[in-house]
Amino acid sequence: MCRNHPMAQLLATTTTTTATPPCGLLTARASASSPGSFLRALPRSRAMASASGADAAAAADAPPSLLVFSGGTAFNGVVEELKKVTTQVAHVLPVSDDGGSTAEIVRVLGGPAVGDIRSRCLRLSDESTSEALSVRTLLGHRLPLDPSEAKLEWYQIVEGEHVLWDGVSQPYRETIRAFLVYFHNEILRRSAEMFCFTNGSIGNFFFAGARIFFQSLDAAIFLFSRVSQIPAESLVLPVISTNDRLTLGCELWDGTIIRGQNEISHPSNGRKEVVNKDCNSCSALPSRIKRVFYMSSEGSNLLHEVFPEANRTVLEQLSKVDCIVYAMGSLFTSVCPSLVLRGIGEAIASRSIPKVLLLNGSHDRETTGLPASGFVTAITDSLNRTYGDPDKSLKNLPKDYVNALLVPKGGQIPLDIKNLASKGIFHVVTVDSIRDGKTGIIFDPHSLIQALTNLISDRRFVEPDLLTENVESVC
């Protein structure tokens, strides 16, 4: 590839610096007015004390590092607020979503689902210039619901004639359009499958084109990150690094097996429609969920269970970060798919840091009737792989995985403090909330991030023996 080609310029090697995360914890009150004010209060750890003065000063000023297990929707609402505090965040997302436009891409072209990854990348993308905003708007655009209108608009975009290209410079235009054209050619090569562009995501199409071209999901994420100018220290990590299709299954307590993430959380009965995860928008599950697992793409029962390996970068990040967060969202189909993989539970249990569950503000189809302790049990069973192969299961306690809960004020989930205490979880903080017209009670983003930074500052998480008989509820 010519060095002057825009693609070569975009992918040119750059030097990234990774600040050493502080071993100490930070201190901040929820009323702090400056997002970075808590950084000055980072205590010196033993490792920092033995470092040179310059190195220790640099480490003391470094923002905290977090790893967040989440899906592609619920946590997006607080990403902007989190960026004001720290960009040293590893966002770990599943690649098993088989709904929306992702489902159509997987049906025709195969490969892992990229919708959640694309969604998070867009939230992390740069907005500081007019061109950055134009690129974000283009990659965040969805085609119309009407099939004919969707196809017509897609052709205008892929041919470079749509108004969405306004404000995008020639190098970026050529790079992005090259992968959209490649995606389109891949569709045409599979003439037996009629691709439906309804509600299609341009970002998903770009992602799919890059993944197929490079034959690498990691390379596609790297390209997307460069195009959307995500901070170098912010990582968007698929929990499984694969170029193959992954299918999520779940086993209910009555023995029923459900195949496919979409069928578990928000079945559409084969209709192509905008996903609605409201528990009132679809029928209830016949029984509560016992566990989720991965199965072969053509499998239909427990005999077809497969055991993919966790992304090694995720395991590396788990060993280094200052805080682990289980984000709000679909518990069994967004968070637990990242927890059931071998090595994840082992890595989390070995750390003495804040391990924080962000409790949902309302129930969905997956969690109807579950109290707060039920969420903790689901996370513990997933990380212990309790109901899988007994030779590969763990026996860790709930407090080894979750040692704090942040709860939205006025939320729908019953807060059973005594049951949480019986599991060794004594730190429960109530956070200010707001009401969303579609999903109900959700965290106020500013209050949530302040509460999270306060938890990271709490020395009791470095000395777990201090976390006893101290249930608290703070507004």
Image: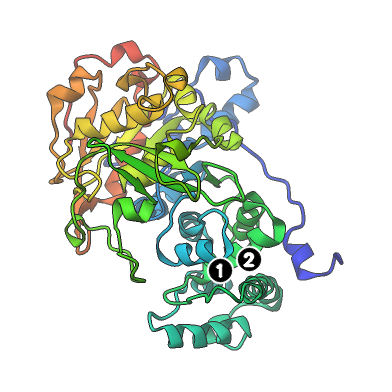
How far apart, in angstroms, are the residues tagged by discs 1 and 2? 6 Å
The residue type indicated by label 1 comes to Phe
Q: Is residue 413 visible?
A: yes
**Is residue 383 positioned above or below 102 on the image?**
above
Element class at badge 2: helix
- The picture places residue 440, in percent across and down from the top left corner, at 18, 56
Q: Is residue 108 left or right of residue 385?
A: right
Residue in the foreground of this view, choosing between 185 and 8: 185
In the picture as drawn, the residue positioned furthest to the right comes out as: 2
Question: Which of the numbered marks, if any, corresponds to residue 209?
Answer: 2
Residue at 22 percent of width and 58 percent of height: 278
Q: Are marks 1 and 2 in contact (CB under 8 Å)?
A: yes
Q: Is residue 432 left or right of residue 127?
A: left
Residue in the foreground of this view, choosing between 331 and 7: 331
Which image quarter is the C terminus in? top left
Residue at 60 percent of width and 57 percent of height: 225
**Is residue 401 positioned above or below 265 on the image?**
above
Q: What scheme was used to colour the molecule?
A: rainbow
Q: Quadrant of residue 459?
A: top left
Question: Which of the numbered marks, if any, corresponds to residue 439?
Answer: none
The residue type indicated by label 2 comes to Gly
Q: Is residue 440 left or right of residue 305?
A: left
Q: Is residue 128 visible?
A: no
Q: Would you call the spot at circle 2 few (<14 residues within 10 Å), some (14-19), or many (20 or more)?
A: many
**Is residue 118 positioned above or below 322 on the image?**
below
Q: Which residue is mark 1?
A: 205
Element class at badge 1: helix
- The picture places residue 291, in percent across and down from the top left corner, at 33, 35
In the picture as drawn, the residue positioned furthest to the top comes out as: 465
Q: Quadrant of residue 449?
A: top left
Residue in the foreground of this view, choosing between 131 and 145: 145
